[in-house]
Image: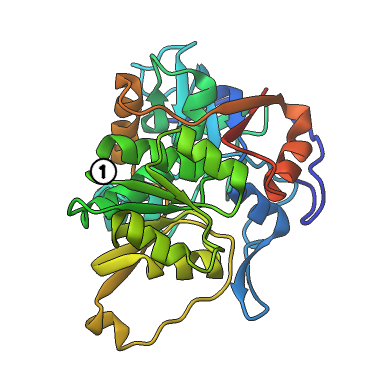
Amino acid sequence: MIAYNTPLEPTEIETPEPSGTQVLVKVSHCGVCHSDLHMIDGFFDLGDDKKLDVTGGRALPFTLGHEIAGEVIALGPDADLELQIGQSCAVYPWIGCGDCPMCKTGDEHLCKTTHHLGITVDGGYASHVMVPHARYILDISGIDREVAGGLMCSGITSYGALKKALAYNRGGPLVIVGAGGVGMMGLQLAKSLWDGPVVVADIDEATRDAALAAGADHIFDPRDKDARKSVFKACGAADASIDFVGAESSLYFAQSVIGKGGAVIVVGLLGGKYSTPIPMFPLRPFSIHGTFVASLGDTQELLDLVRSGKVTPPAVSTRPLDQANQALDDLRNGRVIGRVVLEV
């Protein structure tokens, strides 16, 4: 990325040599994520014509890509010697300072000091990526690389959201709003872990059909004026809903279908603004949670689930790296079902 709000262009530098605890990974696959679109735009939509500027602290040119898989090809002199040259791996990109209380309690992804690969530090739309420490190099034996990279964002985002929703699971339905690549992963996880019906709401007919084929118990178009009543008639009020879109309309629908004591987990970043009468929180009552990817420990758990065969990741289509702009354009315009992964 050489400028914001413009197509990506190739750049070239010398392949770096790792120092200290660094690990150099040769990238073979990197997933294409909606977050990449926000990075290109340089902002998030806050509603009411307000924008959150995210251009600060990122020198251009900048390399996007945080869903990275590849192989270890070089180690710094202080790197973990248990790593093997040629080891197939995925890279955990949500890197913090490593020293603050948040990092030391396992929530490094929430650290105020971000070194997120492909977000604040050069990422995986490249031939190589430098990783600061071996603990972010994850063994993916038994998992295809084209799948493993996507687990580092879409996978753990879905898993982190579902773990929050599971706290409200009383045997009632879970409603998944938005069944793109992340939502489809959420559906697969919910089929394995949720005790009760799993419902998918999406505005696109083909996506709804894909969700039904992937195991959703019910599908609905949230734009239908009777969609909320249809959910209640089919399976009752939801224990929880997960909004994988993050738009005004999706969040309003997600909170409308939960019952008393239920919760909405907000994942998506499409943008907008939400409000609700304050007395409804104690009178209903209900909860709204935000979630951001997941911890390194959660990521290990997800890899084990996928490796065991208990969770089937959504369909992946691969494209060469030089088609990154077309892949991003297709994602922006809703022409992607499942996940798109760039092959390097």
Q: Residue at x 38, y 59 (%)?
A: 231
The quarter in which the N terminus is drawn is top right
User: Closest to the observer: 23 or 117?
Assistant: 117
Horizontal and vertical percent position of residue 120: 58, 50
Residue type at the position of mark 1:
Trp
Q: Residue at x 53, y 52 (%)?
A: 202
For the C terminus, the image quarter is top right
Residue 162 coordinates in the image, percent (x, y): 32, 48
Q: In terms of depth relative to the viewer, which is nearer, 40 or 315?
A: 315
Residue 54 lies in quadrant: bottom right
- The correct choice, above or below, for 51 with respect to 99 in the image is below
Q: Residues within 10 Å of mark 1 (few under 14, many from 20)?
A: many
Is residue 171 positioned above or below 49 on the image? above
Residue at 67%, 47% (x, y): give it: 334
Q: Where is mark 1, residue-wise?
A: 194
The quarter holding residue 53 reads bottom right
Q: Nearer the viewer, residue 176 or 159?
A: 176
Does 110 sit left or right of 74 as displayed?
Answer: left
| Horizontal side, residue 148 vs residue 344: left or right | left
Q: Tell me the element at label 1.
A: loop
Horizontal side of 208 relative to 56 (left or right) equals: left
Colouring mode (rainbow / by chain / secondary structure / one colour): rainbow
Nearer to me, 2 or 164: 164
- Give the image location of residue 94, x and y in percent: 45, 45
Residue 168: tell me if it is visible.
Answer: yes
Residue 118 visible to the viewer: no
Image coords of residue 146 (percent x, y): 55, 23
* Left or right of 23, for residue 336: right
Tell me: residue 187, above or below residue 266. above
